[in-house]
Amino acid sequence: MRLADDPVAFDVVDNIAWVRFNRPEKRNCMNPTLNRRMMEVLADLEYRDDVGVLVLSGEGTAWSAGMDLKEYFRESEEKGLGAVRKSQQEAYGWWRRLRWYQKPTIAMVNGWCFGGGYGPLFSCDLAFASHEAQFALSEINWGILPGGGATKVVADLLSMRDAMYHALTGELIDGKKAAEWKLVNESVPLAELKTRVKQVADVLLSKNPVALKATKDALRRVAEMTYDSAEDYLVRAQEAANSFDNEGRKQGIHQFIDEKTYKPGLGAYDK
Ligand code: ACO
């Protein structure tokens, strides 16, 4: 199923897709090859009937050491603006796909998590870290601002004071502090991390999958809405979930394509 040099590894066991950053020798930093491969793997797994929950972790001592400073930054910049924008789109693209993923997602942060790693961390619906994991917005340590959404992630999840301290100092925090700051849901000893994540994944697997998708999207959407807009959105989202299979629409296509009894550009189908 996977090659030793594949930058993304995965297994599907008991309806859980265990996806792993797989560049342990480079502390799982994200280069363009990894970003392209991650998009493929996510796409392949998203609608599989045997996948109900996706867990993202890292091989070796890192979850992800952020963006690959050599390949993602330096080498793209040497090729020019077009290459820079392409690399950004590849990275942001899979983070966005993961943010709105069909199945619930859990970040299992087993080790180092830096900078650009906060993008996929936030994309995952839930996050569990080991006590031993180490997090930092290290951008300030090499002279850039936390881009690629990282600033937005800490502004959304942390208090203003903690976010500001974290971004301005670049200091490491461990998994316990990350849980205290609500960057992750919980932290547990590394030896117990997979067991705890499996326990949570099994809870999710016992729920209605349409309701899970509607709920996770609703939580992200309403955060940006007024109360009244949220109320309206939630009524409509629930009704959309209730009528997921819209027969009338199928009839409309059938009468145009197969029966050729009407033209949608000129009138309505026969109900
Ligand atoms: N970009 C490019 N290469 C990296 C990165 C990275 N982000 N992180 C690690 N590597 C490479 C190292 O250059 C080294 O390569 P080499 O074996 O060819 O020399 C290899 O991975 C192993 O790294 P070490 O530093 O030897 O590993 P160690 O376990 O001692 O340290 C640590 C781990 C602390 C994660 C260190 O590698 C590090 O500081 N990495 C950079 C973290 C960072 O600040 N990332 C950028 C965040 S900002 C952003 O993402 C936009």
Image (cartoon, rainbow, N blue to C red):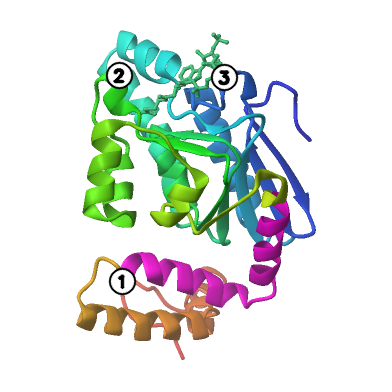
Q: Is residue 194 above or below residue 70?
A: below
Is residue 77 something one can see in this rendering? Answer: yes
Mainly helix, strand or loop, the magenta region?
helix
Element at label 2: helix
Q: For mark 2, what is the residue?
A: 142
Q: Secondary structure at mark 3?
A: helix
The earlier-in-sequence mark between 1 and 3 is 3
Q: Quadrant of residue 62?
A: top right
**N-term mark: 2 or 1:** 2
Task: Confirm if mark 1 falls within 8 A of ligand 1.
Answer: no
Residue kind at label 1, given as amino acid type: Val
Residue positioned 79% across, 35% down in the render: 1
Position in image of residue 229 (x %, y %): 23, 79
Amino acid under disc 2: Trp
Numbered label attached to residue 211: none
Using a 10 Å C-alpha cutoff, classify the residue at mark 1 as few (fewer than 14 neighbours), some (14 to 19) or many (20 or more): some
Answer yes or no: is residue 243 visible.
no
Q: Is residue 221 above or below residue 146?
A: below
- For the record, the magenta segment spans 194-221
Q: Is mark 3 within 8 Å of ligand 1?
A: yes
**What residue is shown with label 3?**
26
Q: Relative to residue 153, is residue 51 drawn left or right?
A: right
